[in-house]
Image (cartoon, rainbow, N blue to C red):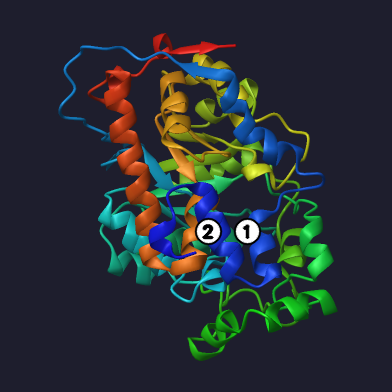
Amino acid sequence: MRLNQCYNFQDFRKLAKQRLPGPIFNYIDGGADDETTYRRNTEAFEGCDLLPSVLTGVEDIDLSVTVMGQKLDMPVYCSPTALQRLFHHQGERATAGAAEKYGTMFGVSSLGTVSLEEIAQQTSTPQVYQFYFHKDRGLNRAMMERAKAAGVQVMMLTVDSITGGNRERDLRTGFSIPFRLTLAGLIQFAIKPMWGLNYVFHEKFSLPQLDAHINMGSSTSSIGDYFTNMLDPTMNWDDVAEMVKFWDGQFCLKGIMTVEDAKRAVDIGCTGIVISNHGGRQLDGARSSFDQLAEIVDAVGDKIDVLFDSGIQRGTHVLKALSLGAKAVGIGRMYLYPLAAAGQPGVERALGLMQEELIRDMRLMGCKSISELSRKNLRFR
């Protein structure tokens, strides 16, 4: 299979599986525990039907939205994800370049593999910094100051990851940073040598947002240890309120799943929330993001920008989320598979296909702009 033969999420997934060593593929592909929430995230859309209107005159389609002060050409953005140069040697550079081409927002993680500063110099498209809350309060402040100096427009604090999820696929293969592979994992690398050649002959893997503070090669020896030892499980609303005040700009909480927490986010001055269960990678058995979207929008949608992620595989999924009141929709695996398989051309193809789907689906729905989507377009079975 080649990139030009990929037309949807499953095609990109198949191509990534074909090209990546098993441990790397399974790190992207896997969820927590029995992966029940991971599966439910996409299945949830199947219980919601679209109701198209006809004869509305829809030659020109406007996909643009404004989210947390950022004007986006399409209502889909690339959610911040960790370790991207592990998947493909271009890493975040490829994601940022593709996001810029399609005029949308992208995120760089605390566990990103390209520096905030380099990405800010490379692109003019809005950059989100996805932040983890560390036990070291001085480190938290230093990282926020650095992000502000780099010109980051939106701070996105992940609040559902005070400890790592139980990702059993990684335990079976021995996936960690640095690698501690099982024999089965090593064999997977041996039969996919192109990934290894790219890894060896491109710049050394690093985590530039954290390298000055944490040595991944010694005491904090793995990503799992990072979550367990460095992140602060005592983080509370007062801590976050201080961060919001210190940042003094667009501040978003990623991982909100209840009305009560959404209201607290409004109360402490956040400008956005992301309804998300981390793509089913944290608490298995958690409700799907889509199932929670309507009640959270009803509670706070007029006070704060409600974003949404987890489970998006199609343009119609995006339209359903937007019709329920989400301002924009984040994708993760949907761009990580093509990134891993083909670098920037892969991410561009994924975003291009999504844009084509959205334009076609909007025409079929009889809507000229995102603002025309509403719950009148939907029926739940």
Secondary structure of residue under mark 2: helix
Real-space CA distance between mark 2 and mark 1, rounded to the nearest whole angstrom: 8 Å
Q: Inspect the image, locate mark 1, and give the three-letter code of the amino acid beneath it.
A: Ile
* 274 on left or right of 126: right
In this picture, is 323 found above or below 349? above
Q: Earlier in the sequence, mark 2 or mark 1?
A: 1
Q: Label 1: which residue?
A: 28
* 10 Å crowding of disc 1: few (<14), some (14-19), many (20+): many
Q: Nearer the viewer, residue 242 or 182?
A: 182
* 168 on left or right of 84: right
Residue 162 badge? none
Secondary structure of residue under mark 1: helix
In this picture, is 362 found above or below 117? above
Image point (55%, 43%), residue name: 242
Image point (51%, 48%), residue name: 9
Q: Label 2: which residue?
A: 337
Q: Which is in the foreground here, disc 2 or disc 1?
A: 2
The answer to whether the residue labelled 2 contacts the one labelled 1, judged by CB atoms less than 8 Å apart, is yes
* 10 Å crowding of disc 2: few (<14), some (14-19), many (20+): many
